[in-house]
Image (cartoon, rainbow, N blue to C red):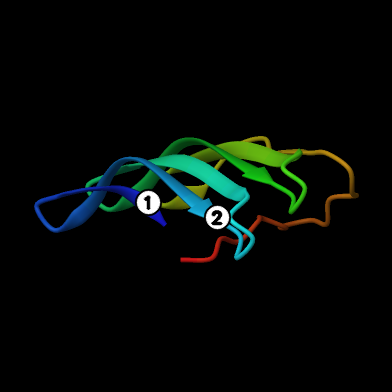
Amino acid sequence: ARGAYRAGARDGVWTTAFESGERESEGRYVAGLKSGDRVFYDVEGRLSAEGPYVSDEPHGEWRWLGRPKNDGDVPTELE
């Protein structure tokens, strides 16, 4: 994972990558909590999912591309 810390917590835009180096996800942290829109990519670099976080929790409508969505399904990231 790449990004900045402020007062010891993740803050600002963070990007994670698959072991291959391809981008896996990108999203914003505020005081260590996921906040705002987050996007996820598949191993070939194509957009696979996107949706908002509020106070570190998935919130609102999520959009899934290339595969069916299961109820309560939220992408996970390699941390």
User: Considering the numbered disc 1 on the image, is that residue within a helix, a strand or a loop?
Assistant: strand
CA gap, disc 2 and disc 1:
9 Å
What number is the disc on residue 2? 1
Q: Which amino acid does label 2 sit on?
A: Ala
Where 37 falls versus 2 (above or below)? Answer: above
Instruction: In this rendered view, identify the residue nearer to me: 73 or 28.
Output: 28
User: Considering the numbered disc 2 on the image, is that residue within a helix, a strand or a loop?
Assistant: strand
Instruction: In this rendered view, identify the residue nearer to me: 48 or 30.
Output: 48
Q: Is residue 70 left or right of residue 34?
A: right
Q: Residue at x 20, y 55 (%)?
A: 9
Q: Which residue is drawn at 89% across and 49% down?
A: 67
- Seen as rendered, the residue at the extreme front is 20
Q: In this view, does 69 lie to the left or right of 59?
A: right
Of the two numbered discs 2 and 1 on the same chain, state the one appearing first in sequence: 1
Q: Which residue is drawn at 56% across and 47% down?
A: 25
- Residue 19 in the image: state x and y as whole percent: 60, 65
Q: Marks 2 and 1: CB-CB under 8 Å?
A: yes
- Residue 37 in the image: state x and y as whole percent: 51, 33
Where 40 falls versus 76 (above or below)? Answer: above
- Seen as rendered, the residue at the extreme left is 7
Q: What residue type is labelled 1?
A: Arg
Q: In this view, does 33 lie to the left or right of 46?
A: left
Disc 2 packing (10 Å; few <14; some 14–19; many ≥20): some
The quarter of the rendered structure image containing the N terminus is bottom left
Which residue is labeled 2 in the image? 17
- Residue 39 in the image: state x and y as whole percent: 60, 39
